[in-house]
Amino acid sequence: MKPEQPFFSIIIPTYNRPEQLTICLQSLVCLDYPRDRFEVIVVDDGSSTPLENIVNPFCNKFQVILLKQRHAGPAAARNTGAARAKGEFFAFTDDDCIPAPDWLQALAARFATFPGHAIGGRTLNALPNNLYSTASQVIIEAVYAYYNTHPSPMRFFATNNLALPADRFHAIGGFDATFLTSEDRELCNRWMYHGYPLTYASEALVYHAHVLTFRTFWWQHFHYGRGAFHFHRARARLHQEPMKLEPKFFYLNMLRYPFLQRQGRVAWLLTALVVMSQGASAAGFFWEKTLQAIKKKEERIS
């Protein structure tokens, strides 16, 4: 008898993006996975427009639950979803993502071999004509490529394509809800701190349709820098060694990566955006460091 497929809880935080959420849910209708072996939990993180009209039409397509909370960020929303989830494994994605039809099948196959691992899949850019979305994708692919070939274990998976055993997720306390960005980086670090392994599954595909402009691209990486500051503080609370800058060849490879994807003028523009992203991240890091220093000084005075 063929063994029963594992039960997944797909958890999707959403905030003021009803159109993107609709497309995401439509993609889940196409999942090549038994309908009685997964549920979908949509967590409304305080959207200004009610989402019942978006979610309810899918109730006859698969098991779906809509939860609501006050706006507290995606980390808190994922924890809200996980608290109600009944799956053996949690599969996290975002409302602007489109999982491939065999996404859960690929994750299930990996968990059959690595049942206690966190599995990170591959995310592809669904907006190749958007230069800023493409640059954002180039950066994450360069980071993944570095960590997948580096002797050290993988240290980071993005939460738009991340699956974990439910019991271990709860055992480490879920996401740190004080993180508004970089919560995935912090979770992966704490996961490894507890001795749990990470495995990359390039065959588990999710397509990311995040529309970016020059302004939103800059602010995205500025806030990543702010999140990086809090990530360093979280490592310090665990008495881990301070993070060191990556070696020069990491940054050289990142600058070279656009030319592996595109040619000519577009490759040069992507490289310029990669450089800009690193500057924005550095600015965000030192902005947050300064804010926290001022806050600490004010607390001492008071």
Image (tube, rainbow, N blue to C red):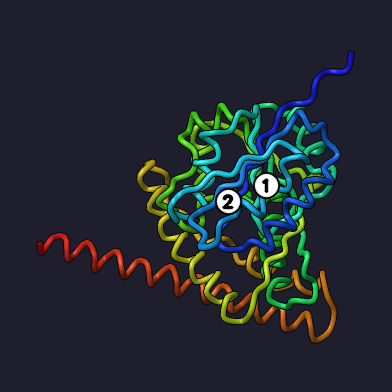
Q: Which mark is residue 13?
A: 2
The residue shown at (67%, 54%) is: 54
Residue 222 shown left or right of residue 63 in the figure: left
The residue shown at (68%, 71%) is: 211
Asked if one can make out residue 57 in the rendered structure from this viewpoint, the answer is yes
Give how far across and how far down residue 175 sits, in percent: 49, 43
**Residue identifier under label 1:** 56
Count of all numbered marks drawn on residues in the image = 2
Q: Which amino acid does label 1 sit on?
A: Asn
Residue 176 shown left or right of residue 17 in the figure: left
Give how far across and how far down residue 213 sits, in percent: 64, 79
Quadrant into which the C terminus falls: bottom left
Q: Which mark is residue 291?
A: none
Callout 1 crowding tier (Cα within 10 Å): few <14, some 14–19, many ≥20: few
N-term-proximal mark, 1 vs 2 = 2
As measured in the structure, the alpha-carbon distance from the residue carrying label 1 to the one carrying label 2 is 16 Å
- In the picture shown, does residue 259 fall above or below 233? below
- In the picture shown, does residue 215 fall above or below 175? below
Quadrant into which the N terminus falls: top right
Q: What residue type is labelled 2?
A: Pro
Give how far across and how far down residue 111 sits, in percent: 73, 30
Of residue 255 and residue 156, the one placed in the foreground of this image is: 156
Q: Are marks 1 and 2 in contact (CB under 8 Å)?
A: no
The residue shown at (78%, 79%) is: 267
